[in-house]
Image: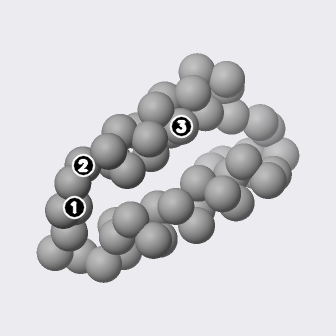
Amino acid sequence: MAKNETVRLPQESRQADEEACLALKAIAGYSPANQTYSLATVTARYDAMRAA
């Protein structure tokens, strides 16, 4: 957890997260061993980040 959760993330961090998510969606057959990193989970967290 962040030390100060009231501080917004820098725009560069959000941009990097968005680019990583889009790149992950482009990987055909992506299936991680740890389902915490599944495409469905990442997409749900990405959508939550965009909504915030």
Residue 27: give x, y in percent of width and height. 24, 49
Q: Of helix, strand and loop, which one carries label 2? A: loop
Amino acid, disc 2: Ile
Can residue 1 be seen here? The reply is no
Find the distance from the CA under tag 2 to the CA under tag 3.
15 Å
Label 3 vs label 1, nearer the camera:
1
Dot 2 corresponds to which residue? 27
Contact check, label 2 and label 1, Cβ < 8 Å: yes
Can residue 17 be seen here? The reply is yes
Count of numbered circles on the image: 3
Amino acid, disc 3: Glu
Contact check, label 2 and label 3, Cβ < 8 Å: no
Residue 52: give x, y in percent of width and height. 81, 51
Dot 3 corresponds to which residue? 18
Q: Of helix, strand and loop, which one carries label 3? A: helix
Residue at (68% x, 34% y) in the render: 9
Residue at (68% x, 52% y) in the render: 49
Above or below 36: residue 13: above
Amino acid, disc 1: Tyr
Above or below 38: residue 19: above
Label 2 vs label 3, nearer the camera:
2
Above or below 23: residue 27: below
Dot 1 corresponds to which residue? 30
| Location of the N terminus (image quadrant) | bottom right
Q: Is residue 37 left or right of residue 45?
A: left
Tell me which label, 2 or 3, sits earlier in the chain: 3
Tell me which label, 3 or 1, sits earlier in the chain: 3
**Residue 46 picture quarter:** bottom right
Find the distance from the CA under tag 2 to the CA under tag 1.
6 Å
Residue at (50% x, 38% y) in the render: 17
Residue 34: give x, y in percent of width and height. 24, 76
